[in-house]
Amino acid sequence: MPDNLEVTKHLARFVAETEWDALTPPVVHQAKRALVNFFAVALTGCREGTIETALQSLASFSGGNQATVIGRPERLDALSVAFLNAASANVLDFCDTHVPTVIHPTAPVAPSLFALGELKRVSGRDLLLAFVLGAEIECRIGLAMSPSHYRRGWHITATCGVFSAAAGSAKLLAPKTEPMVFALGLAATQAAGLCECLGTPAKSVHVGNAARNGLWSALLAAQGLAGPADPLAETPQLSVLTDRLGVSSRIRAASSFIRCSIASSTGGARIPTRSWKR
């Protein structure tokens, strides 16, 4: 276990240096299931009113024809598409759930990787590897802050999801330790999302921004824009970030078919807006 001044660098090095051969067949299988589920829920959500409104707003400012909005004919700039596809995947709460933290791990990271894959050539293996590593960082940060983080009113899918999008995207853009640290630091300063918004359309803004801002963090870091040296040093339960890192994969604790409300033990009823306060 590194001391607390090295934990971000330790995680960054892990993401930067891990190669395809390190993934076990069960992890690869779960990653493929998660991505299939992502496309299914994004297709289901892409015509919801929340997504229509967000698309109209973003299209007004998008000067690019870079990437595909899943299930729709529109093409926008990659950052806006990452936002929209993440919001579409999460808008109905049928996206996968990491049961120990109740994070929806795929919705923030997959859209950023697919949008990036339309900006540069990315192999299927490279995308799967980046996805697994991004989700690993996301779930480890979530575990290190649980359960107090959610109970204090932070929407954990958004606040932790931005790190997965940043780490996964940086793996495809600049797989070296220093830009990975920068990407995580830039993501840290953009981590946001309030549980007060659950049950309202505003919740989708959290998840969309996690994907968009994580991708942007990686793009900035790849161009040399620096972030703090160790943004994760003050994380509660610090040892969870690196415990059995590279040995035990957190993605296997995610279920593709547990609805947010069920995962939260509400007996199948949707979570009321203020239930997080209990």
Image (cartoon, rainbow, N blue to C red):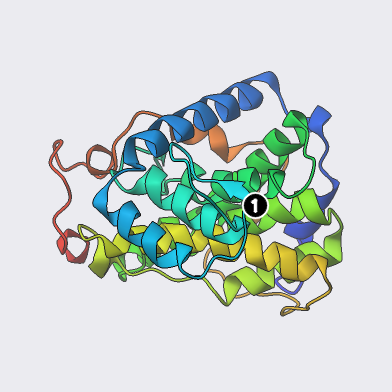
- Rendered view: 78 above or below 231: above
Tell me the quarter of the picture where residue 278 sits: bottom left
Q: Is residue 68 left or right of residue 202?
A: right
From where the camera sits, is residue 7 visible?
A: no
Q: Is residue 151 left or right of residue 9?
A: left
Q: Secondary structure at mark 1?
A: loop
From where the camera sits, is residue 39 visible?
A: yes
The residue pinned by badge 1 equals 66
| 108 or 159, nearer to the observer | 108
x, y percentage for residue 49? Answer: 25, 52
Residue at 72% in and 80% down: 228
| 265 or 51, nearer to the observer | 51
x, y percentage for residue 10? Answer: 77, 59
- Rendered view: 262 above or below 116: above
| 264 or 271, nearer to the observer | 271
x, y percentage for residue 215? Answer: 64, 60
x, y percentage for residue 174? Answer: 83, 57
| Badge 1 amino acid | Gln
Residue at 76% in and 58% down: 12
Q: Which quadrant is the N terminus positioned in?
A: bottom right
At label 1, counting other C-alpha atoms closer than 10 Å, the crowd grade (few under 14, some 14-19, many 20 or more) is some
- Rendered view: 267 above or below 136: above
Residue at 47% in and 32% down: 39
- Rendered view: 106 above or below 203: above
Q: How many marks?
A: 1
Q: Is residue 110 left or right of residue 147?
A: right
Residue at 47% in and 41% down: 73
